[in-house]
Image: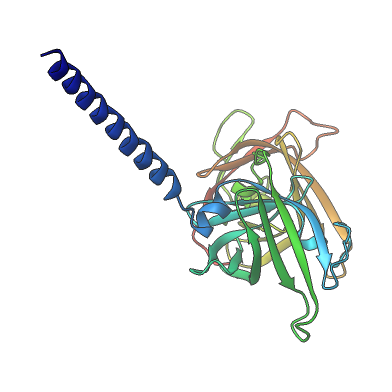
Amino acid sequence: MIMNIVKKLFYVASIFVFAAAIISCSSDNDEAEIIFMPSQLLSSTPWETTGAKDKNGNSVALNDPSVSGFVGFSYFRENGNFAIYGLNDVLRSRGTWSVSADGKTRTITALNPDGTTIFTRIVDILVLNQNEFTYRIHTNPNDSSVYYDIKHTKVSHTETNLGQLTLASTPWETTGAKDKNGNPVTLTDPKVSGFVGYSYFRANGTYAIYGLNDVLRSQGTWSISPDGKTRTITALDANGNVIFTRIVDILTLNNTEFTYRIIPDATNNPTEFYDIIHNPVNHLEP
């Protein structure tokens, strides 16, 4: 009888050992079957440009004009949108991205605020894993032997949230104005009419503002202050000469509204101001 009991205990113990082995193998298999698609790898982390090499394998400084246009912090979102900032966190490009099914090429399409294409760039992927993304860019369309390998490394870098991307992601239409007392001001009133129109703030730091009649009123460069509190535009003539520089306080900047405060005569009458309200609009740049 004692032998029967021992046999039964041994049998039960064997079952537990076998079951544990199955569970262990199953767990190992589950881990082994986790395969990341190339697009998942690219969107899994921010990337920082950390190196560049020419066609001969020689290192190229990141501020070299040959490669400086490809340097920065890159964010490839799962929804197919991307944003690239310079290493100074200034927005350089935004649009859509994709990786080919075979994982050999990456495509980005840079977009204007109205959704039209600025350029499409296709590069060869040399390395793409959880820690490194390196692509080859052919910079001379007439000579395929000229290329640079741009290396990016996984980085913990929070995307700047100063409103640059928001401002550059849509055209804006002036839809209202208020005086210092909060009273509405008609957009044809001379006090505010000079600030009324359709605005296009491109990700490359250039802008254009048209009247509501689609006539160009101003163009040049724009920026947002490091604290996100002011927006600056510098209007330029056809030769690149400065016409004026205007700095305004940002009151609201989100996906549904952009409102700034303009003080016409800040030196002599700083208490007189107007709040200029803009909303996103589907309006192709003329």
The image position of residue 248, as x and y in percent, is: 73, 40
* Rendered view: 229 above or below 174: above
Does residue 209 appear left or right of residue 244 in this picture? Answer: left
Residue at image location 58% in from the left, 60% down from the top: 95
- Quarter occupied by residue 204: bottom right
Residue 252 can be seen, yes or no: yes
Q: Residue furthest top?
A: 2
Image location of residue 256, percent across then percent down: 50, 44
Q: Residue furthest left?
A: 1
- Note whether 180 is above or below 43 in the view shown: above
Q: Position of residue 156 (x, y in %)?
A: 67, 38
> In percent of the image, x 28 and y 34: which residue is there?
18
At horizontal 72% and vertical 70% (from top left) the residue drawn is 137
What quarter of the picture does the N terminus occupy?
top left
Which of 86 and 216 lies nearest the eye of the viewer?
86
Q: Nearer the viewer, residue 226 or 273?
A: 226
Please identify the residue farthest to the bottom as the structure is shown.
142
Left or right for 129, reference 231: left
Inspect this view and state whether residue 173 appears.
Answer: no
Which residue does the image show at 64% across and 39% down from the upper left?
Answer: 161
Is 251 or 204 nearer to us in this picture?
204
Colour setup of the view:
rainbow
Q: Is residue 128 left or right of residue 79?
A: right
Where is residue 27 shown, x and y percent of the image? 38, 39
- Image vertical order of residue 22 relative to residue 211, above or below: above
* Number of numbered discs: 0
| Quadrant of res 273 | top right
